[in-house]
Image (cartoon, helix red, strand yellow):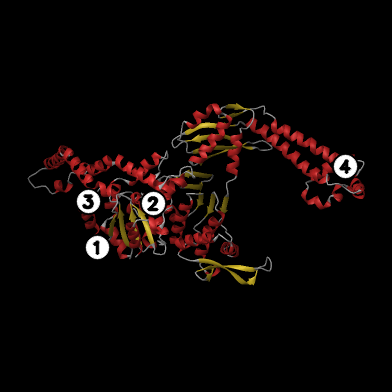
Amino acid sequence: MVTLDAKLSMNEQEISQLKEDIALEAQQLRNALFSSSAECGISVRLTFDGRDRPVGYVSKVSFFTANEEGNEIFAMEEESAAEIALNVRRVSQAREEMEALNVGMGGLREDEFRMAKEVGVSYALRSHRGSLSDSQMRSLNQIIKNASSPEEFTQICRSKVSQLKTEMEAVERAEIENPVKSFSGESTAVPDYVTKLIARIAGLRVHHLSEQRNPIGAVEARKILRLKTSRGQGAVLAGIQSVVSTLLGVQIDAFSSDETSRRGNQSAAELDVDDFLVQVNGSGIREALRLILDYEFEKPHILLVEEPEVHLHPALETALMQYLRSVSEKCQVFLTTHSTNFLDVGSLKNVYMVSKTPETTVRLLNVAEAEEAIPQELGIRLSSLFMYDRLVFVEGPSDEQLLRIFAETLGISFGQASVGFVTTGGARNFTHFATASTLTFLGKRNVRTVFLLDRDERNNQDLDKLRARIDGISELVVLDRRELENYLLDANVLARYLVIRTDGALQPSPEEVQEKIDKACEGLRSVAIERRALKEICAPVIPRREKVITRDAEEDFLTAAKRELDEVLLAVQELRNSVEKTLQLAENDVEARWSDSKIDLIPGDEILKRLFREYGLSFNKRKDSVRIASVMTGAEIPAEMKRIIDGLVV
């Protein structure tokens, strides 16, 4: 027996639909079903037994939450599965026999009937011979031998069809002897909500790009040409061309060729890349186009890609991985790869290692296993050192994604400008990444570096200290607003996004959203004050090691060490004694700036959390921030953000 376990993530609407389907069959459990909103999706177990005629079946379906397995909504044992499989085979065999009988019901002439009785029905029905199985032909031969005339043969076929329909309906209505488990208890039939669920899963579109891929060319050219010449499809084509231009830095188009297509007299289509036939472009561009166009044309729910790095330059690998990450917002993507560049850009929590030692094993890697000694030491990968003309150090992965989306919306290509990103894990790691040796090393290789930091609670003195560390060897860009999420707080954009997020269930106006943003800010006024106070109260106070080492000759080690620790204790005590004063100063500072800059003083993700909560939704910084940015138009992107992005590519 073999079992496969899978977890399928579902959005709020899909989970609600499943609960509603269950409630239709168990109204008494409606309150219990909808009392929880923690479900993230379903766990499904597939079982394949070891019988002579193997049966594969769904043996278990459960909800799951972020931390644990949730309520079981369906379970089936092997005996139940075998019984259902037998019934399915009986129905299938009956349907197959009915198909043959329907052919026979078409009627035979007298000469065909006599010949059929002598040499077999295959002669009389030779036009259907290729569509009927041997068992179907045997069934018809038996009927025709028992018939005395063509009319009787037709009548027997009609009677047999009626009998089979009755038998099929009886089998489909029959209760099974070995009950299955449903959400409400044991059941002698598979619940409709399970059948609907499996049908929805089976309806998912899956696209598979194998390692050996068909060369790109005429097929894709015809599809693009069809978009060009079809009414209302211009926007679709423009969207595809924009994606290709942003990622690969090339323009694609299609034209009718002077040659004639092999399929007929119509003109063949040709695909152009920057005014050259696609065939004369490098294999890297062709392979990248293969992947991008396959997704853009097919729009699958699940995309399986083997060895996406084949023939790709490292810079193209990174561009494609960023594309696949954006695609994964709407499509589940599975990659198999040997390229460390795809691992660099991907999320390590989603990396599995498949090995054969000697049997095949699959295991989820942790960060320590996945990263090599050099990346751990430098914090940047060797591929990053030589692949780009410019490296931008950002605090988190969502920062990089937001910048890329803003750039794409503005028609700016980081790929063409050879701009790469390094995630530092937060401003606290600035010192680690901004070492003079590392930045000088990069500068000598003509790699320009830029540090992009959130404003947080930094004042001008803090910024001067940061700039002094990298003066002459790197650049520092600090946001005017507190963090990147603060640039998403546009009422028009958020109103549109809430409609998209809820599939139209919510229809808030920009005015209503702005009102709720203002309300959220007022509720977070104390947070802005406390964060500014904490910057001073929780400033690091560290014993100075050098003061002990360079102590006077007459002072022994213990005396010097205790003296230094006493100074630390004194500094901490001074901080403690001035907490009230520090808090008051922070409050005065916030109040002075509140009316003009309140939206810039509060963490943007905290405002968004409160806003979403007003609408009964949760806010996920990593997912929702990127999606909000995706619906912004160029005119809605703040001017400061436009200047920053322009500065990164100049």
Q: Give me the residue at 48% from left, 40% from top.
A: 12
Quadrant location of residue 136?
top right
Q: Which residue is mark 2?
A: 372
Q: Which residue is mark 1?
A: 472
Quadrant location of residue 100?
top right
Label 2 element class? loop
Q: Give me the residue at 23% from left, 60% from top.
A: 471
Q: Which residue is mark 4?
A: 153
Label 1 element class? loop
Label 3 environment density (alpha carbons within 10 Å; few <14, some 14–19, many ≥20)? few
Task: Say whether marks 4 and 1 touch (CB < 8 Å).
Answer: no
Gap between marks 4 and 1 measured at Cα: 98 Å
Please state if 125 lies on the left or on the right of 410 as rendered. right
Mark 1 or mark 2, which is nearer the start of the sequence?
2
Q: Amino acid at mark 3?
A: Asn
Q: Amino acid at mark 2?
A: Glu
Gap between marks 2 and 1 measured at Cα: 30 Å
Please state if 323 lies on the left or on the right of 102 as rendered. left
Gap between marks 3 and 4 measured at Cα: 96 Å
